[in-house]
Amino acid sequence: MRVVIAEDSALIREGLNGLLRAAGHEIVAAVENGDDLLHAVRDNDPDITIVDVRMPPTHTDEGIQAARALRLIDPTEPILVLSQIVSGRAAADLLTTGGGGIGYLLKDRVGDVDEFLTALDTIAAGGQVIDSQVIHKLLLHRSRLDDLTPREIEVLALMAEGKTNTAIAQTLVVTDAAVAKHVNRIFAKLRLDADDTSHKRVRAVLTYLQQS
């Protein structure tokens, strides 16, 4: 894959560069601020972009705002936010801009290189990979989703992490059929169209995140 890295820490930037090159990926640009990120994506058309939240000049949310700008230009632009923090509302704004091809992982919770590389592949292919701590923070406040049961909320949070029905069943120690029933009830309660088979999971998660 062709990758753009936006990370102001030289140590982490070079570490990602070496890791991804060793895995056979091409680093087409490695930048340290939001403005350079926008130019790098425009000029190189990467398969995926890895972005930190805090970058110069203020080290607040420049990275995620640049990522959101990219998604407003192209809602299908695959982006992985890789950060040390959960940036509440800014994260929700990004995750609800566009469709799939989005991820938010916390640096200190990525414990396995293969897991990280798999997450990249999933996002580049249009999927979602979101850390459970990010999901927890974003889903603390609900409104139109109050009809969901605690188990359905749990299932939806696991869906947002990119888990399949089988993986959810293994996590919750229930059958695949039980998970399928929960998922179908979630779709019904969120009033997703019956014929919207290809994007139901993405729409369900995005609808959920918009309430945070």
Image (cartoon, rainbow, N blue to C red):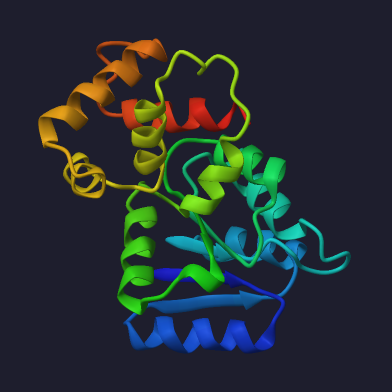
| In this picture, residue 81 sits left or right of residue 179 | right
Name the residue: 20% across, 31% down.
179
Residue 200 point in image, percent of width and height: 33, 25
Q: Residue furthest right?
A: 58
Q: How many discs mark residues in the rendered view?
A: 0
Quadrant for the C terminus, please.
top right
Res 124 quadrant in image: bottom left
Name the residue: 70% across, 54% down.
66
Q: Is residue 95 above or below residue 103?
A: above
| In this picture, residue 171 sits left or right of residue 139 | left
Q: Decide which of 80, 45 is in the foreground and name it.
A: 80
Q: Decide which of 35, 171 is in the foreground and name it.
A: 171
Q: Is residue 64 above or below residue 193?
A: below
Name the residue: 36% across, 78% down.
113
Quadrant for the N terminus, please.
bottom left
Residue 177 point in image, percent of width and height: 11, 29
Name the residue: 29% across, 16% down.
185
Residue 95 point in image, percent of width and height: 56, 41
